[in-house]
Image (tube, rainbow, N blue to C red):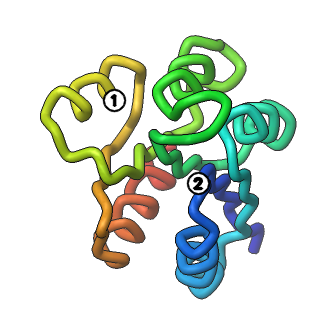
Amino acid sequence: MIKKRILLIEDEVDMVYALTLHLEAMHYEVLSATDGQIGLDMARKEKPDLIILDLMLPKIDGYRVCRMLKFDEKYKKIPIIMFTARVQEHDKKLGQEVGADAYITKPFDAQVLLNKISALLKEH
């Protein structure tokens, strides 16, 4: 069985570690980047099956990373989950406008995130 690859673009090291443990336990291969520019470059190079994307990132914020991928024919089909502490309605609306497939807020329920990942991977 080929493992699905998930790119985690998140600048909080503890969050990367915790999410990686959850995802690897579910048999996903996890790639990670700690800033928006590295994440964008990795997404283009690796073409992961799904991206979990923080919004508040060094260099390029998550909204711009999402928009740059979703408005590019080569990458627009990769599902992107916005993963953020921003809970304002306008933040969620902006996430939809730039093409995010889902929006999950921190602190998060691991099962909700895993269920969303599974659902998005089945759709794509």
Question: What residue does disc 1 label?
Answer: 95
Left or right position of 66 against 42: left
The residue shown at (65%, 49%) is 49
x, y percentage for residue 91? Answer: 25, 31
Q: Quadrant of residue 77?
A: top right
Q: Nearer the viewer, residue 104 or 77?
A: 104
The residue shown at (73%, 69%) is 29
x, y percentage for residue 96? Answer: 30, 26
Left or right position of 18 against 72: left
Q: Secondary structure at mark 1?
A: helix
x, y percentage for residue 35? Answer: 68, 43
* Sequence-wise first label, 1 or 2: 2
For discs 1 and 2, the disc positioned in front in the rendered view: 2
Q: Quadrant of residue 26?
A: bottom right
Quadrant position of the N terminus in the picture:
bottom right
The residue shown at (55%, 80%) is 18
Q: CA distance from mark 1 to mark 2?
A: 16 Å
Q: Nearer the viewer, residue 85 or 124?
A: 85
Left or right position of 84 against 59: left
Left or right position of 22 against 46: left
Q: Secondary structure at mark 2?
A: loop
Q: Nearer the viewer, residue 12 or 99?
A: 12
User: Of the residues shown, which amino acid type is indicated by label 2?
Assistant: Glu
Callout 1 environment at 10 Å: few (<14), some (14 to 19), or many (20+)?
A: many
The residue shown at (53%, 81%) is 22
User: Of the residues shown, which amino acid type is indicated by label 1?
Assistant: Gly
Pick out the residue farthest to the bottom.
Answer: 25
x, y percentage for residue 124? Answer: 52, 42
Question: What residue does disc 2 label?
Answer: 10
Pick out the residue farthest to the front.
Answer: 58
